[in-house]
Image: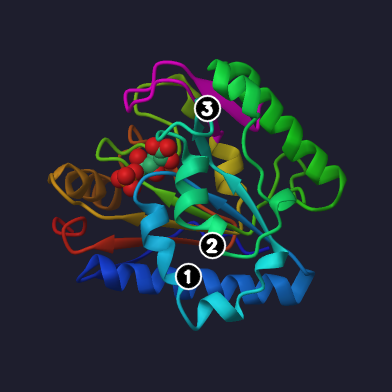
Amino acid sequence: MTEARHRKWHKFQTKDELSVAMAKYTAHLSEKFCKEKGIFTVVLSGGGLIDWLCKLLEPPYIDSIEWSKWHVFWVDERVCAYEDPNSNYKLAMDGFLSKVGIPNKNIYAIDKHYAADGNAEHCAALYEECLRNLVRQDIIPLCPNGKYPQFDLQLLGMGPDGHMASLFPGHPQINVKDKWVTHITDSPKLPPRRITFTLPVINSALYNLMAVCDDNTEQCARSIADIFKHNNLALPAAHLTAQVETMWYLDKAAASLL
Ligand SMILES: O=C(O)[C@H](O)[C@@H](O)[C@H](O)[C@H](O)COP(=O)(O)O
């Protein structure tokens, strides 16, 4: 195992270029892991990510990726009905997953009923149970310290306040180590009820790719500068690392203060 503590980053002139690079990165790792172990575990987040992933729906990727070997998870999820426009599952299904040949049984959404009831605590506990079952079935390995599941690739986004997944600045979830999945009921980004992987799980992934586009405000650019120049650990995204590679893809605006 290589421990890559360093952040690597690339700046892209346009969101389109960032999307193309993200598709290449994902397709390359898909090929590598499908060849090496016959499956590829991919963890998605919400936000702009699904849009940026859409290059994978175009040639050459759409036909060359071994979609049937993908297993898909969410690093965080809003606790609401599947049909709710806030649902990360719905966002990914509508925009991406329904258009590729990933078997339904390999798409691991939060529990439908507790989600519709808004029961974040139960959703988190059941999602952790789901991951533990997949570890028992050898679909997800444990990382070498034996404590946390190890995913192949996580695709993450950062909010303007420096949050990643549903780990928000000034909230206690960032410190949780005794769980794989935890919950929040007062998220500053709406909707308020969410589940999220804990930081040690996020950092146990082999590859973490964080994509940040600063559409409307300079706040993301300021957070990026705070993380890259000052390693301000008050911002959850400053804690991001991975077992092999931690890659940040930034658009021109997000990288403007570096
Ligand atoms: O469910 C969520 O809200 C997300 O998973 C969240 O962590 C997101 O990734 C960031 O807020 C970035 O979102 P944008 O890409 O929309 O800026």
Residue at 28% over, 61% down: 250
The residue at the far bottom in this view is 60
Q: Which amino acid does label 2 sit on?
A: Lys
Residue at 66% over, 60% down: 102
Disc 3 secondary structure class: loop
Q: What segment carries the magenta color? A: 178-198
The mark nearer the N terminus, 2 or 1, is 1
Label 1 environment density (alpha carbons within 10 Å; few <14, some 14–19, many ≥20): some
Q: Name the residue under label 1.
A: 57
Tell me the distance, in whole angstroms, between the alpha carbons under discs 3 and 1. 26 Å
Question: Does 254 appear in magenta?
Answer: no
- Tell me if residue 177 can be seen: no
Q: Where is residue 95 in the image (x, y as percent from the top left)?
A: 44, 54
Q: In this view, does 44 lie to the left or right of 32?
A: left
Which coloring applies here? rainbow
The mark nearer the N terminus, 2 or 3, is 3
> Depth check: 156 or 170 in front?
156
Q: Is residue 179 left or right of residue 219?
A: right
Question: Does 193 appear in magenta?
Answer: yes
Rendered-image quadrant of the C terminus: bottom left
Tally of marks: 3
Q: Does the residue labelled 3 lie within 8 Å of ligand 1?
A: no
Q: Mark 3 points at which residue?
A: 81
Q: Name the residue under label 2.
A: 99
